[in-house]
Structures are given as C-alpha cells and as structure tokens.
Image (cartoon, coloured by chain):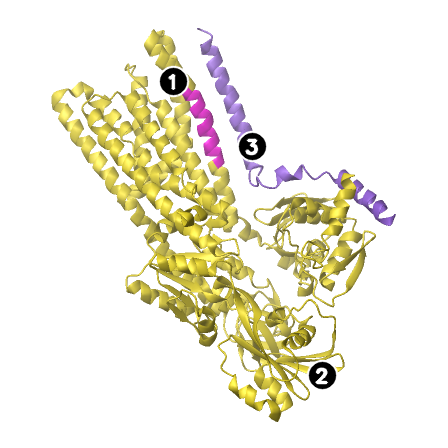
Chain colours: A purple, B yellow
C-alpha cells in the first residue's frame, strides 16, 4: 500500500494541471458563449457552395 | 439529390401552403400589386419591397446565396428583416480618430478592435451571412460572433478596410449594427455578467475536482475505519483530504463566506450565514482533529460537497438571472451616438445627444430618431412615439409643437430646436423613475429571507443550549454532538427549498415561452389580487382590422374595400395594414398623402379620398344625398373611423378595430373566475378602449392615460391593499411596470420594457399568462412542501443529535438525502399543463 504515497500526490498534480488548463480556457473566453460554437461545426462552406452551383445548373436546365 | 432538394425547397418557400406569395428575402407576404422581381443566383425571385430586393441582390452578387439554403435548414419561422429602408446610418465619426477613440481600441501591434451589437440577428444563418460577407472584405479580419448576446467582436489586423466599411457592409445585408462604446463593454451589464460567469465556472470546476478527490479519500477512510487501516495511511489520507478541502473551501467557498460576513456586518442572518456556518462547522473541526491526531470522523467530504452543489445551484440561478436582467443602458442606445447640430456661436458642431444645449438646431428627416427634447421650428411630420407613449399609432406634429428624444420620424422633415438639457429630458426622467422604482425590489427580497433568518437563529440558540447541557453531563462529547447537530440540521434543505423550486419553475417557464427575470415575482404572483392590462399590443395585437363597413352611396362594401386597399397598398401608415384585400388587381396612381389627415389617389381613372372624416368633408363639401346617413351613424362605438369618398360622393365609412390576441377572452374569464378584478389601462381614447373591451370579462377599462397616470392608478390600488400585476409593453409602461408588485411584458413590445419586467412572455398568445399563474401556484405549493419537510426533518434529527444518538456520519447522510428529496420534489414543477388543469 506504500504506493499510494506516490500515486495520490501524482494524481493531485494531474488535477492541478487539468484545473490550470480549464482556467486558461475560461479566461480566454472559450466558455463565454456556449450557444454558437456547437452549430458552427455544421457549416461546411465547401458543401454549401457546391450545392449552390449544382442548384444553378439544375435551374438553368 | 440532396442539393437539388435544398434548392427546390427554396423555391417552394415563395409560394407556401397558404397560397400567398412570400418575399424571397424576408418571407413576409408580398403586398398585392407589388411586382418587384430580380434575378438572384440565376433564379428569378419575387420581393416585397426594394429594400429586400437590394439586400438579396447584394447577397447574391457577393456569392453568399447559400444563406437562403442555410436558412431553410435552420428554421421555417425565421424572418429576416431588411432595415434597408430605414436609410443609411452615419458611421463616419469612426473615421475621425479622436471621436473613434471611445469605440475602437488600438492594440500594440496596430490592429483595431471593436464590438458591434447587431439588431435583426435571430439565428445561425444570419451570423453565417455576416461573418462571410465581412471575411470577404479582407483576409486580415478576425470575428467572433456571440449569438445569444447579439454581439460581434471584430479585430482588423491591418488598415486596408475601415470600421465604417465593416458597419456599412453589415447594414447592406439588412441588419442594424451599432458600435458599442469601449467603457460600456466591461462596465455594461453584459460585461459584468461575463466576468461573473467566468468566476463562477472556475469555482465550480475547482469544487468539482476537489469533491471527487476528497470523496475518494473518504471511501478509503470509511472502509479503513471498518477494516483496520494502517494508522500512518489514515493520517496521510486525512492530510491530503485537508489539503484539497482547504483549496476548495477558500477558493470556491469564498462567495458564501463573503456574503455571510456582509450579512453579519449589517446585523442580519441571511441565507449564506447558515451555509457558511455549516461549511466552517464541517471544515474547521476536521482540521483541528486532523492536525491534533484526534481519532474520529472527519467531514472534509461534507464541506466540499456542500460547496460544489451549492455553487452549481447558484451558477444556474445566476445564468437565468443574467439572461433576463435589467439593461437600463438600452435607453441611451435608442439615441444616435453623435448628431451634427447648429449652435449659434459655434456654427455646425458634432455632439453627443447628452451634450445638447438649449437652442441647438437640427434638421431631421424620414426614419431619423429625435436625439433630444425639442420644439419644431419648421415642418410637419408623422412621428412614432411608441417609445414614450407605447401606443403604436403615429402622431402628427407640426411647427411649434414639441418632440421628445427617442421618438422616430416616419414621414416628413422638420427643423427642431432643443428645449431641454439631457438631464431634463423625458428619457432621462424615465430612467430616473426606473432607478427609484428598482430600489423597492431589494426591500422585497429581504422579506423572503426573514423566515430563513428566524430558522437559523433558532437553530443556533438550540445548539448552544444543548452544548451547555452536555457540558454538565459529559464534556468530552460536546464537540461531536455539536457537530452532529450542525450537520444534521444544516439548513441546506431549508435554504435550498425556495431556490431549487424557483430554478425548476424558471426552467419549465422557459419551455413555455416565459422568461423569468426576477425570482421574487413567482411568489408575488400567487398573491396578486388585481390585474392591470395595457390595451394596445397586450390585450390586442396592435394591428387594426376593419370591423365594420358602412356603405354610404351606391357602391357595395366589397367594392369600397377594394378601392381603399388599392390606395393604401404601398403606404407605411399603421392603419394601412387594415386594408389588405388580396383579391383585387387595380393599382392606384397619382398618390398624394396629407400627413395626419388622409390620402388621395386615382384608382381606375377616378379620384378618391380616404382619411379622417373632417378632412374628407373639407375636401369635398358634404354632398346632400349623404348628409342623412352621415349624421345618423356617427356614434358607432369603434376605435378609428375612416371615410372613403369619390370626387362626387361619399362611398363608405370604415370602422377599424384592433384585433384581440389569441386566448384573450379565455384568459380574462380564468382571471375573473379566480376572483381577480381586471383593469384595462390604455393611452388610447376612452371611447376606443370601452368599445374594445365590451363583451370581455373586464371590471374596469380606462383610456386617455399617460404613463404617470397609469402609475398613479396602480399606486392607488396598492394603497387600498391590493397586490397588483401589470401586463404591458412599451417603455412608457416602464414606470408602471416597476410600480406594480409584479410585471409581465409581451415580447412584441419594445426591448426596453422587457428588461424591466419581472416576466417576459415570448408568445403571441395570452395563454402564457395562465401557464404563468399555474406554475407560480405549483412553485409556491412545492416550496411550502419543501420547507415543511425541512422543518420536519430537523424536528426529528435535532433531538436525536442532541441526545447523542446520531453519529456525525449518519447526520451527514441524512442531510444529503433530505436535500436530495427537496430537489426531486422541485422537479415536479411544470409537469401539469394548463390544458390538463382546464380538464380537471
């Protein structure tokens, strides 16, 4: 069981690092707006541009 | 296939199920006779106005046509506005470095940063459009759009484009941008909310991680106690627990201690006092025990758990509050940032509306906002005073009359001269009124904490008494017993009772399109004895319809409506909307509008007059044949009467009436069944109000009321002991909305009154009011149940703990379960709907 004397402080260091990373994310504004970014991913411009040009072709026929 | 389907859907939007043709850009029904056609992306599209056409053409030419497909995918309800017709806003002051300094921050590397608030942005599609149009201007532009706050942060990394170009581009897309002053950014409520939000998130994460760790160690300690742990490992785990708990208690728990300390300094026992006490009660003795190697249970896990759960609860509450909280800054946002005025000794100078001096002169035209209280030197205008009076009908103002800051010119041009400094202006006065009324709200919340205060006080006294008793019986057990008592009876469940019920209520209200800005409002709602409703825009839709046509000559009613519709088709006047016969095909030519009186136009070769009775008569003289009918029916109880005449004859009289909102009658019936009198308060003419409310379950309807009259009326009711709820819209309602014990604003009203009201209704149906009452009642009921449970639990647990029968760990478990029960009970709020209620 002596190993806990090493593992527990180690886990605390990891947590400190995780909290540090989270603080950085919060301070750089990543959590200010939780509504917009999840939808940004749905906007792939290539696809939309393609759809527009193919739509144009369809219409001109 | 998919792509074609998307394009096809775009087509189908033009002629939707109702058969009416809709504008390609804004999706509004295209008015009859309008034939504005343009090629967008190679496809012929129809538009409702040239503004929409210009926007769509611009979007198409900029290769951003995907916007329309994107919008398809987003929602069917999206309505894009085109404010193009409002005329270009003057942003040129941003080119002047000195004036721009307050709006644009220049960073060390020379890039310019500013934030723009956007009106007319409703969804992702709008955001996509704006971002893509702007990125096309330059590669050296960084954007971050915050849809929920409708704010766009812009960083220009080189000087190739100016801020003016950026704003102009956004405006060309059909949105209304407004650059936000730098000092407003962080000092504004939004800025402060952002900071509070960040701080709360940091505290929650620290508490969350800490809680998981400490509980892991606690498991080791619990089992270790049972199975015989190595004393050294036990000490190690205790010390590590203490380390983590110390971080959490002093970082995440700080707000509780700070609030409690503030309460104590004001000689009060607030809600945070027991929480701080419980945290301290669990933490400090455990520290003492750990450091002095005293065997026994330690409570670091409890302390950390309190903090985590309470922080999350507070965070959710705060988020809800932020979203709907007051934004008094909105008042000054109504005004332009700068105006060019003529001042006698200085010539033409550029000032902000707040710097105005009496005598400053200015010429204002179509769609401009009056920047200060002024007198008209010259000219006549139709002016929209909805901001001040809340009534949607524009009024006519002419030479010598006064105009008020914040009002909008709809038609005509005037030259004005300032008559008041900013501090004396109506808008500033309203702002002051709001602030004064707001002070009252604080007093209200304190009464809610009264009960908690007594509870805490009683608890502390009992604990002290028990401790004294044990001093004589068994001094060595005091510490454990006091701790068990504090933990067992920790008023967590009690202090959670109201907030958790409020959060649950707020959540289910949101699902029903109701936004709760002030938690206090719910409990007040259940005590309301008198309801006051505004008329225009609240009880009614604010859109007049023809209620009755009285033919005066040979022409039939339908023919008269057709002629009037043709004349009014392209008019912007509020009443024009009433004449919307879709079937006719004639067009009107040679239109002449007399502001504040009427309109004359040629339809199918004949000249017609439509407008106020007095004006039409003046234009014609009264033809003999009609005199009799004219006189006999002059007292029809309707809101607005409009007369139609040809050059020879009177044709018809139109009675226009505002349409009632959906479920208005049902809602009024429910209220009267509940025994609450309903008063309708309106700024409209008394006759109109009376006519509108006939047949409705209304106990009193009053017209001709100014904002202050309404406030006085409510105050009078309150002095008579009534608890008054006010439903209204418009900034003019703002004073009365604050005066009322609880206020509800309709979302279609001006944004400003939203921010002041306790509850905001998003829907157009008045059924929301019934849902609101129902949920308020449930909330009260469940809060009461929760409180009773908390008292009951304490009544059982306290004596047990006091007798030393309850070990501290059992006490902690009981406390947690009791809190959990309170939370689960609160989740029941909003399960019953209004329909279920009506059936029952």
SS at mark 3 in the image? helix
Mark whose residue sits in front, 2 or 3: 2
Q: Quadrant of residue B617?
A: bottom right
Query: Magenta segment: does it hold B209?
Result: yes
Q: Is residue B289 visible?
A: yes
- Mark 2–mark 3 distance (CA, rounded to whole Å): 73 Å
Mark whose residue sits in front, 1 or 3: 1
- Mark 1–mark 3 distance (CA, rounded to whole Å): 30 Å
What is the residue that sits farthest to the left in this orientation?
B472
Residue B651 in picture, x, y percent from top left: 64, 83
Q: Quadrant of residue B649?
A: bottom right
Q: Which residue is mark 3?
A: A24
> Same chain for marks 2 and 1?
yes
SS at mark 1 in the image? helix
Question: Is residue B425 positioned above or below B45 on the image?
Answer: below
Residue B751 in picture, x, y percent from top left: 53, 58
Q: Which residues are magenta?
A: B201-215
Disc number placed over residue B607 in the picture, else none: 2
Q: Residue at x 41, y 57 (%)?
A: B743
Q: Tell me whether the residue at label 2 lies in contact with that at label 1, contact meaning CB atoms closer than 8 angstroms.
A: no
Q: Quadrant of residue B169?
A: bottom right
Tell me the subunit letter for badge 1. B
Q: Is residue B428 visible?
A: no
How crowded pointer 2 is (Cα within 10 Å; few <14, some 14-19, many 20+) is rated as some
Query: Magenta segment: does it hold B219?
Result: no
Tell me the subunit letter for badge 2. B
Q: Which residue is mark 1?
A: B218
Residue B829 placement, left or right of B170: left
Residue B137 in picture, x, y percent from top left: 76, 49
Question: Is residue B602 positioned above or below B252 on the image?
Answer: below
Q: Nearer the viewer, residue B50 or B262?
A: B50
């Amino acid at each position: 069981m002596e190993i806990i004397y090493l593992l527990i402080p180690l886990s605390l260091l990891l947590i400190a690092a995780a909290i540090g990373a989270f603080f950085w994310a919060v301070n750089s504004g990543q959590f200010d707006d939780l509504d917009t970014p999840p939808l940004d991913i749905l906007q792939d411009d290539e696809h939309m541009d393609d759809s527009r040009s193919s739509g144009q072709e369809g219409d001109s026929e | 296939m998919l792509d074609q389907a998307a394009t096809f859907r775009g087509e189908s939007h033009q002629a939707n199920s109702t058969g009416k043709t809709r504008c390609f850009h804004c999706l509004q029904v295209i008015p009859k006779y309008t034939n504005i056609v343009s090629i967008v992306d190679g496809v012929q599209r129809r538009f409702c106005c040239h503004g929409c056409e210009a926007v769509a053409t611009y979007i198409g030419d900029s290769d951003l046509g995907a916007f329309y497909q994107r919008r398809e995918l987003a929602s069917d309800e999206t309505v894009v506005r085109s404010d193009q017709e409002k005329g270009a806003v003057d942003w040129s002051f941003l080119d002047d470095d000195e004036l721009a300094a307050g709006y644009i921050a220049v960073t060390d590397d020379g890039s310019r940063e500013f934030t723009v608030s956007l009106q007319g942005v409703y969804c992702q599609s709008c955001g996509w459009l704006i971002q893509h149009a702007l990125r096309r201007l330059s590669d050296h532009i960084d954007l971050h759009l915050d849809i929920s706050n409708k704010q766009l942060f812009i960083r220009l990394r080189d000087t190739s484009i100016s801020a003016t170009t950026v704003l102009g581009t956004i405006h060309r897309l059909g949105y209304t941008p407004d650059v936000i002053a730098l000092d407003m950014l962080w000092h504004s409520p939004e800025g402060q909310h952002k900071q509070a939000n960040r701080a709360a998130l940091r505290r929650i994460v620290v508490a969350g991680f800490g809680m998981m760790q400490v509980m892991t160690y606690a498991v080791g300690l619990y089992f270790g106690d049972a199975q015989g742990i190595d004393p050294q490992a036990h000490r190690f785990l205790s010390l590590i627990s203490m380390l983590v708990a110390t971080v959490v208690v002093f970082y995440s728990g700080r707000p509780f201690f700070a609030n409690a300390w503030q309460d104590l300094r004001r000689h009060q026992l607030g809600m945070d006092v027991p929480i701080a006490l419980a945290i301290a009660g669990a933490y400090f003795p455990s520290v003492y025990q750990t450091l002095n190697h005293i065997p026994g249970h330690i409570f670091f896990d409890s302390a950390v758990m309190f903090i985590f759960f309470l922080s999350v609860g507070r965070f959710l509450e705060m988020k809800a509050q932020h979203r709907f909280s007051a934004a008094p800054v909105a008042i000054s946002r109504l005004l332009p940032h700068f105006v060019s005025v003529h001042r006698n000794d200085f010539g033409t100078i550029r000032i902000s509306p707040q710097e105005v001096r009496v005598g400053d002169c200015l010429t204002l035209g179509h769609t401009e906002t009056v920047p200060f209280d002024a007198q008209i030197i010259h000219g006549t205008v139709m002016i929209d005073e909805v901001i001040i009076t809340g009534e949607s009908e524009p009024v006519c103002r002419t030479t010598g009359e006064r105009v008020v800051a914040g009002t909008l010119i709809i038609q005509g041009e005037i030259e004005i001269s300032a008559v008041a400094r900013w501090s004396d202006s109506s808008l500033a006065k309203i702002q002051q009124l709001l602030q004064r009324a707001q002070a009252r709200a604080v007093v209200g919340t304190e009464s809610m904490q009264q009960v908690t205060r007594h509870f805490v006080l009683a608890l502390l006294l009992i604990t002290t008494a028990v401790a004294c008793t044990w001093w004589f019986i068994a001094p060595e057990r005091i510490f454990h017993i006091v701790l068990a008592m504090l933990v067992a009876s920790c008023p967590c469940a009690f202090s959670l009772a109201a907030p958790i019920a409020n959060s649950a209520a707020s959540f289910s209200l949101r699902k029903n399109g109701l936004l709760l800005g002030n938690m206090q409002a719910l409990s007040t709602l259940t005590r309301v004895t008198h309801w006051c409703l505004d008329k225009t825009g609240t009880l009614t839709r604010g859109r007049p319809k023809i209620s009755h046509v009285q033919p005066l000559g040979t022409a039939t009613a339908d023919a008269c409506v057709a002629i009037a519709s043709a004349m009014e088709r392209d008019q912007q006047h509020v009443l024009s909307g009433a004449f919307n016969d879709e079937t006719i095909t004639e067009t009107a030519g040679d239109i002449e509008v007399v502001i504040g009186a009427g309109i004359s136009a040629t339809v199918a070769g004949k000249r017609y007059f439509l407008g106020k009775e007095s004006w039409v008569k003046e234009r014609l003289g009264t033809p003999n044949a009609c005199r009799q009918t004219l006189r006999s029916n002059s007292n029809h109880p309707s809101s607005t009467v409009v007369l139609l005449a040809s050059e020879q004859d009177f044709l018809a009289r139109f009675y226009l009436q505002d349409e009632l909102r959906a479920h208005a009658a049902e809602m009024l019936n429910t209220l009267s069944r509940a025994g609450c009198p309903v008063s309708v308060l309106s700024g409209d003419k008394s006759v109109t109000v009376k006519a509108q409310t006939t047949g409705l379950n209304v106990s009193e309807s009053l017209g001709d009321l100014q904002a202050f009259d309404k406030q006085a009326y409510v105050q009078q009711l309150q002095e008579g002991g009534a608890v008054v709820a006010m439903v209204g819209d418009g900034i003019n309602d703002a004073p009365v909305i604050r005066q009322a014990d609880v206020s509800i604003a309709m979302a279609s009203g001006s944004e400003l009154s939203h921010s002041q009201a306790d509850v905001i209704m998003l829907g157009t149906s008045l059924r929301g009011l019934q849902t609101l009452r129902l949920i308020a009642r449930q909330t009260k009921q469940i809060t009461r149940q929760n409180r009773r449970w908390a008292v009951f639990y304490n009544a059982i647990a306290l004596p047990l703990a006091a007798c030393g029968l309850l070990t501290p760990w059992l006490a902690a478990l009981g406390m947690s379960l009791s809190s959990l029960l309170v939370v689960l009970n609160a989740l029941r709020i909003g399960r019953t709907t209004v329909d279920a209620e009506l059936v029952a």
